[in-house]
Amino acid sequence: MEQWNLIGLGLALGLFAGLYVLGRVGVGFTTRTFLALFVGVGLGVVLRDHVDYLRPLGRVYINLLLTIVAPLVVVSILASITALGSTRALRSIGTRSVVWLLGLNLAAILLTLGLALETGVGKGADLASQGVDTRSLDEIKKPFSEVFIGFFPTNVVEEVGDNDIIPIILISVVVAVAYALVAERTPEKVAPFKALVDAAREIVYRAVGFVIALTPYAVLVLTAVAASSATGRRDQLLSLLGLLVVSYVACFASAFVVDAVVLRVAADVSPVRFFRKIAPAQLTAFTTQSSAGTLPLTTRLLVQRVGVPADVAGFTAPLGTTIGMPGCAGVWPIVLAVFAVNGLGLDYGLRDYALLVVLGLLVSVGTAGVPGTATVTATTVLTAAGLPLEVVILTLPISAIVDMARTMSNVTAAAVAATVVARRVGRLDDAVFAACDADDTDDEPAGRHAASSSLPSAPVTVDPSVPVGACGIDDRPAIPVRAR
């Protein structure tokens, strides 16, 4: 009914006003975002299917995030590599980033495979896959050779316009490496280019801050829409509840158990404090279902709360939106494959499961960090493994719900990889990490408390337009800080 859709819009706008007031009276960004999550669930349950006017609001936010992804990736990588100062540093950070991103995905794959086999997900399920139309999936099936070729751009403008992250990264890296080679011999010739890159970075980061400030409002409507959809399909979801639960357990175990061990062992940081600091990025990923869309917030939190140097965060975090992706390329394809094997009573042996592990790693190279990516990766894995694609169709009703946990796992892994890389190259700033927790009790930017771990002579501008340290959104001027 139209009137219920209007009522839903009115309620949402009223809640928006409440969030705005809370921000004006000093309630922190993280607190408001979590509050929006819980209020959004309640709103979705109350409205059920009457959220037609809320969907566009959430979509606008996602579009805004995706719009700034390409500029952010370009300026982040260019600024990161120009700040590294040498091609040797680039090789070190680049290699470590790829290794840790793929390593975290491998851990998620093995965890999921063990969990799915132990719980017997899919056993006794009547999949009834015969007769299901899979033509809609045929057009997204791509052999790995075609995916690999797609890594290399043919039209720079087109790649940027389509937000094809891997080609954008390659373009940016080639230009930045060329800069580094020239700068090592004749730095005066490329000094104007570096100044332009640094200026573009500041402008883009400021624009990112404007979008990130909308996060609590977007979380509210996106959660309401998701909760409404889940409520409307309750009967249909009952038969897939086991798959849903196993998927969530695998994603959260990957994000908060495996990653916690890696943080403690490889980065020597407190996992609890780390998760508190990146909680806004995790929550944004959970609600937007877009790793690429969450990238602006992830990068800023890594630099200003965790203490990862801007060049490392600006390189590893964007790379993590296309390489690794344990939720979309690790957990979902594997748990879906086991669900199909058990549900259809197929004869699967150790070698077959080993193939699934390899396929999960392969499809994680070049995975797009946008909503719906897991359907593509699952289709690719199931096709290569000889499993019926009908299973992907049958699980679509819960895919969007699982995608929330999958994306959270993706973003967490990218942040963890960046932190580990920073530690392994000896550049993680412990003073920044220890100075300011995300407890919404302090209004000082992280830069006030600790020096940056960037190059000794390089000024670091703390941009208060996004959540930093324990701070919420702040409109005070940025404060330049030099490393001591």
Image: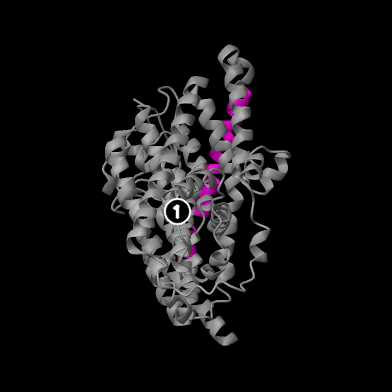
Is 201 situated left or right of 455 in this image?
Answer: right
Q: Is residue 197 above or below residue 57?
A: above
Q: Is residue 261 above or below residue 247?
A: above
Q: Residue 213: horizontal and vertical position, in percent?
A: 48, 55
> Which residue occupies the foreground of this view, 114 or 375?
114
Dominant secondary structure, magenta: helix
Q: Residue 9: horizontal and vertical position, in percent?
A: 53, 77
Q: Secondary structure at mark 1?
A: helix
Q: Residue at x 39, y 33 (%)?
A: 421
Query: Residue flagged by tag 1: what amino acid is it?
Result: Gly
- The outermost residue toward the top is 185
Q: Residue 22: horizontal and vertical position, in percent?
A: 38, 64
| First to last magenta residue range | 192-219
- The part of the image, by quadrant, that contains residue 250 is bottom left
Q: Residues within 10 Å of mark 1 (few under 14, many from 20)?
A: many
> Label 1, on which residue?
327
Let me know if residue 320 is in the magenta part. Answer: no
> Which residue occupies the foreground of this view, 231 or 67?
231
Q: Quadrant of the C terminus?
A: top left
Q: Residue at x 60, y 15 (%)?
A: 188
Let me know if residue 193 is in the magenta part. Answer: yes
- The part of the image, by quadrant, that contains residue 422 is top left
Q: Is residue 427 above or below residue 419?
A: above
Q: Residue at x 59, y 68 (%)?
A: 56
Q: Residue 270: horizontal and vertical position, in percent?
A: 26, 43
Q: Quadrant of the N terminus?
A: bottom right
